Image: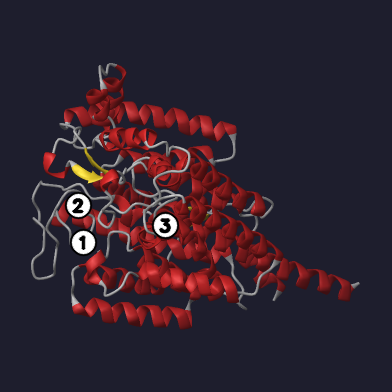
Amino acid sequence: MLNKINISLGSDNEAKEQLSISRQEWGWTLLFLLSMSMVGLSFPLGYVGLIIVLLNRFIKDRYDFVICFTILTGRYALVGDEDLPFKPMDLAFVISVIGFFVYKKSPIVKKIMVAMLLYALVLFMLAKTSDERMSVQFMRMRYYLMIFYVFVPLMAFSGRDFYIKIFFKKLFPYILILSAFYIIDGFILNGYVLIPNSYTWINEKSIFYSLLWNPLSTNFPRKYPQGLFILCMCLFPIMKYYKLSVKQWIVIGLALATTRTMTFIFGIIFAYVVFQGHLKAVMKYLVGALIAVVVLYYIDGAMGGFLRIQSTFDQFVALDVAQDEEDISEFGSGRIAQMIPKFEVLYDLDREWLGFGFLHPELTTNPKYMIYNEFYIDKTNSWEVVTGVEITQLQTVLDIGYIGFLCQLIFYLYLYYIIRHFRMAKYYLTVLVIISLWGLGGFAGLNTELGVLFLALSLAAIVLDERTCKDCNQVNNATNVMLT
């Protein structure tokens, strides 16, 4: 029994093992992800598949269940808003709130709970200073509050042991299969079939009887990376415990190439380099990354900018020689164009410290929050509400001002402070850094469910791991006393 416990928990200093995945581990993961794809294509069989997988995994394997339920909650480019009769995120939020009250709380969980209550209270107090209706504001405020999702995995493993190395290993079939989906969609089917909601700027929807695809062409559409966000959960295990084969790295690398999204890729590389933990390794990876970027810059130029690397760096050059606001607005693929007039209104109304509140791009109708954005190239979308900036840090300032932004930062850093002595604490910090960097491109961040769900899951995994460690230490200590 003791040997089993020690093997399951692992050691911080153990050598990395080669990642190997059994046929059975592939099976349920593939069935779940294919079911998600079918639901995203409005194919009825997908709904049946989801129910079967979730029920089976809840009964047979809680590790798989919490991963599947998290992906379903965030949808991650697999399922669209209109594909389900309700938002899975709302169901998860209700379960999270229930768990907040009924879960048996350890001293650590109580500290986390108090921090969450204070964070929620700050958000509500700032929202109350806005003249927008609270019913409208809550539509977007709930994205900020999805950190409460931590209670879903905590409840799933209530009364059960949780071995974090098992959890880590369970993550890899998901990222590898999703990467294969991206490769097939992006380079073979040339469309939106296996990752049906990874659109960039398309008004149509891919449906099973009317697929958006162009098989075996050289179109190679750019696909948004939300379906690969689970990679933020895998990076720490790769650095600490598992070695991927060359084939596995190639699969992940090609999937990243289909996204052609530098902010997304940079977030992964930055975290991988910084969290290595050894200065020599960090310097080695920095030099390697610099050489790779230079080489890829010229390769991208020769390919006509297909990889979007050259255009990304050229934006910084253009910013340096910008003459006026119009030139500056073109930086960040138009993201600054979204920001400039909205921040002008924020300062004109003296709301920079408190924010506008959680305005909704469709439900907010107050004329004082409407602007004409002259920096947009497409003038048909120039009339808009003073919200909706893709850079999530700037959007947070628009919502809750500099006071709210500072409180949000303190809250998430305080969560790390609570768990700082836990052996897996760096796992939370790694995920926090990655999703924050992704927020610069508007892809995740601390005000979207796409980022906060995985951050909550990482926090829950750390708390559960520490609880199991303590239980095992108590067993070991009791055994030693008996032997003495």
Relative height, residue 249 to residue 342 (above, below): below
Task: Inspect this view and state whether residue 268 appears.
Answer: no
Q: Nearer the viewer, mark 2 or mark 1?
A: 1
Q: Nearer the viewer, mark 1 or mark 3?
A: 3
Where, by quadrant of the figure, is residue 137 drawn?
Answer: bottom left
Task: Inspect this view and state whether residue 102 appears.
Answer: yes
Q: Earlier in the sequence, mark 1 or mark 3?
A: 3
Q: Which mark is residue 186?
A: 2
Residue situated furthest right in the rendering: 484
Identify which residue is drawn at 21% across, 57% down.
Answer: 184
Where, by quadrant of the figure, is residue 460 drawn?
Answer: bottom right
Q: Secondary structure at mark 2?
A: helix
Residue matched to label 3: 141
Q: Secondary structure at mark 1?
A: loop
Identify which residue is drawn at 56% across, 70% down.
Answer: 100
Q: Which mark is residue 272?
A: none
Check disc 1 and give the amino acid type.
Pro
Q: Nearer the viewer, mark 3 or mark 2?
A: 3
Q: Which mark is residue 196?
A: 1
Marks 3 and 2 close (CB-CB < 8 Å): no
Query: Residue 260 location in percent, x, y?
Result: 26, 42
